[in-house]
Amino acid sequence: MKDYLLLIVSAVFVNNILLAQYLGNCPFLGCSKELGVALGMGGAVVFVATLATAFTWLIQTFALAPFGLDYLQTIAFIVVIAALVQFVEMFLKKAMPPLYTSLGIYLPLITTNCAVLGIAIIAQRKEMDFVTAVIFSAAAAAGFLLALLLMAGIRERYEVTRIPKPLQGTAIGLVTAGFMSLAFFAFSGMI
Amino acid sequence: MSGFTQALTRGMWREIPPFRLVLGLCPTLAVTKSADNGLGMGAAVIFVLVLSNFFISLLRKLIPAKVRIACFIVVAATLVVAVELLMQAFAYPLYQTLGIFVPLIVVNCIILGRAEAFAAKNGPLLSIADGLGMGVGFTCSLTVLGALREAFGAGTVFGARVMPEAYQPVAFMVEAPGAFVCLGLLLAAMNALGRDAGQPPAGCRACGACYEAAARREGGA
């Protein structure tokens, strides 16, 4: 139990997928202008990343590894993720319309979100077992959501702040991310 | 021939990927701890980008519009697997340093963005030129950023000492925060320089939306 707790803390704070491992920067900078959008995007990532890691783990263990097809990992994973995203979208539309309306528009954007593929590959490279991989993916994606929400909170303030012209937009977003990342560095002493 | 030259040079300055188009930020931040890494990553991206542009432009009349993104991803993924195998065979230390960012080239927005915005509409030769130009622009940006971070963070560039002996390396620069701040400031510098060119950077809404944004820019220009 303690191991899982450590794993979660490490994935959310210490090795934050965005601020320490640089994955998923495009949505981080693109979808962090409003809190509502950030919540939708982050929620969709948590949902899809957890499912995708579970599916890719099964595929790696039962379809690729036994036949020595490990080199097909990248192509198999991205196809699985693309198909999964499509499937999740159709399923949500049918079964859970309220959730679909809040997450729906973000789902197609997730196929090419490197955080999702990145989490699946990290879980594979660290040779986690199934339960660990699922917990890790949920925690890492929760770290993404946390960073996205914090960033959106800061950037909403920027709307009413006077920022030098060349720094406006992505540039100030990146600088802010740098200082957030510095703050998250403090967590590395925890474990 | 002027169309060819234009396709080739556009990616090198006017629409240089990480700065002007703001595409492909994750590898830009992650692998630029040193100039070496930046160059290596750039080379891998050039390879994938040129070939993916070439194949997609050959297949552009065969790919149905509805499933084109999936087709682009499969083409890119195939090439990335080839790069992975080649790097394991000929550049293993680099492969290990770049880590998961080699397989992640497949979701690099530049590949999909160029496929959607250029290769799907132009002939193979022009597409190769576009891929090469964008790839070289990307490589240059990565190498410059890598050299800058290496110079301040370790006092060296390409492993050769450039700072005086007494220089105390700023570890901040080679860690994650340094990557973000350094890229942000470079971006601001490019914005300040490019003001007269009238090319505002296209804000990247989300990785998946990049190709849409790029396509719209391409259509509007």
Image (cartoon, rainbow, N blue to C red):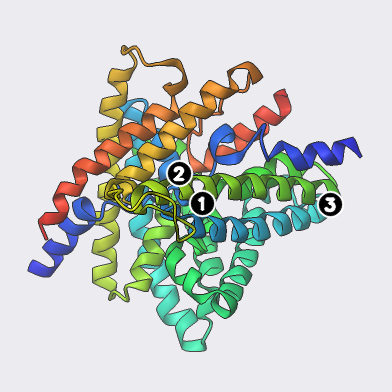
- Labels 1 and 2 positioned on one and the same chain: yes
* Residue at disc 2, secondary structure: helix
Secondary structure type for disc 1: helix
Image quadrant assignment for residue B179: top left
Residue drawn at (59%, 40%), measured in percent from left and top? Answer: B17
Report whether B196 appears left or right of B8: left
Q: From the image, tell me which residue sits under label 2.
A: A107
Three-letter code, disc 2: Leu
Residue at mark 3 shares a chain with residue at mark 1: no
Q: Which residue is mark 1?
A: A86
Is there CB contact under 8 Å for labels 1 and 2?
no
Q: Tell which tag, 3 or 2, sits nearer the viewer.
A: 3
Could you say where residue A82 lies in the image, as x and y percent from the top left? 52, 56
Callout 3–callout 2 Cβ contact below 8 Å:
no
Question: Which amino acid type is marked by label 1?
Answer: Gln
In space, the residues marked 1 and 2 are separated at their CA atoms by: 8 Å
- Mark in front: 3 vs 1: 3
Instruction: Answer above or below: position of A115 versus A109.
Output: below
Name the spot of residue A121 as percent of width and height, x first: 41, 66
> Can I make out residue A39 in this image?
no
Q: Identify which residue is drawn at 23% across, 57% down.
A: A11
Most foreground residue, B176 or B83? B176
Q: In the image shown, does A105 or A156 lie closer to the viewer? A: A156
- Real-space Cα separation, disc 3 to disc 2, in angstroms: 32 Å
Counting from the top left corner in percent of width and height, residue A140 is at 28, 55
Tags 3 and 2 both on a single chain? no
Please give the label number shown on residue B124. 3
Residue A157 to residue A186: above or below = above
Q: In which quadrant is the C terminus of chain A drawn?
A: bottom left
Q: Earlier in the sequence, mark 1 or mark 2?
A: 1
Disc 3: host chain: B
Label 3 and label 1: CA atoms lie apart by: 31 Å
